[in-house]
Image (cartoon, helix red, strand yellow):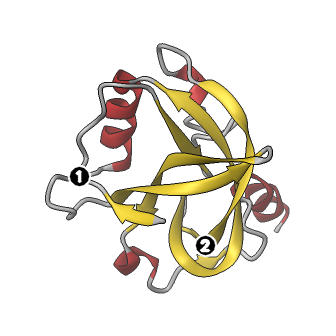
Amino acid sequence: MNRAMMPQTSDLPRNVFVYGTLRAGGSNDIGRYVPAPQLVGQACIEGALYDLGDYPGLVLGRPGRVQGEVYRITPPVEAALDRLEGVADDNSGEYLKREIEIGIEGRTLLCLVYEIQLSRTVGRVLIEGGDWLDHLVSRKRR
């Protein structure tokens, strides 16, 4: 299941899949938000991950696997993530907010995920392993 969403937030806590700078230890570590998001677990989803310079962009529905983490977040944190990701009401922002089903620890959860606008991946490097944090380490070695 993959559906486009308007950038409005829910009144209830939701799950979010993070795969780039928002991961634990990343430059925008989701743990810095208040109230602190609750880690649900590690996950992997289908899609392609691109190196956009200081951060990655995910394109759903492409071949490949993307590593990430799932967190339970509150509506204020969701609103802050929407701002960080540049989500716009008319879908013209840098990222689109999607809702997908993700298998994690033997169950399926509905999760938000921020997908980069396809046009922003043109000429960008595909991250073969689908893991942004590993990619950063290997990029520093070059």
* Residue type for callout 2: Gly
Q: What residue sits right under mark 1 in the picture?
A: 6
Q: Residue at x 52, y 72 (%)?
A: 60
Label annotation for residue 135? none
In the displayed structure, would residue 13 be above or below residue 127? above
Residue at position x 69%, y 32% in the image: 40
Task: Count neighbours of disc 1 (C-alpha within 10 A) and say few if under 14, some if 14 to 19, many if 20 or more.
Answer: some
| For marks 1 and 2 on the same chain, the one whose residue lies earlier in the sequence | 1
Residue at 37% over, 25% down = 12
**Residue 51 horizontal side relative to residue 107, left or right:** left
Would residue 52 be seen by someone viewing this image from the given angle?
no
Q: Tell me if 130 is positioned left or right of 17 in this view.
A: right
In the image, taking residue 120 as reference, residue 18 lies left or right, namely: right
The residue lying toward the viewer, choosing from 47 and 57, is: 47
Q: Count the marks.
A: 2
Q: CA distance from mark 1 to mark 2?
A: 21 Å
Q: Which residue is mark 2?
A: 47
Contact (Cβ within 8 Å) of mark 1 with mark 2: no
Report the quarter where the C terminus lies.
bottom right
Question: Would you place residue 86 above or below residue 121 in this image?
Answer: above
Other-residue count near label 2 (Cα within 10 Å), few / some / many at <14 / 14–19 / ≥20: some
Vertical side of 65 occupied by 131: above or below = above
Give the x, y percent position of residue 119: 35, 80
Numbered disc 2: secondary structure: strand
The residue located at (52%, 47%) in the rendering is: 110
Please say whether residue 142 is visible from this viewpoint: yes
Residue 28 in the image, given as x and y percentages of width and height: 55, 36
Q: Nearer the viewer, residue 102 or 36?
A: 102
- Amino acid residing under circle 1: Met
Residue 13: where, in percent of width, then height? 44, 26
Which residue extends farthest left? Answer: 90
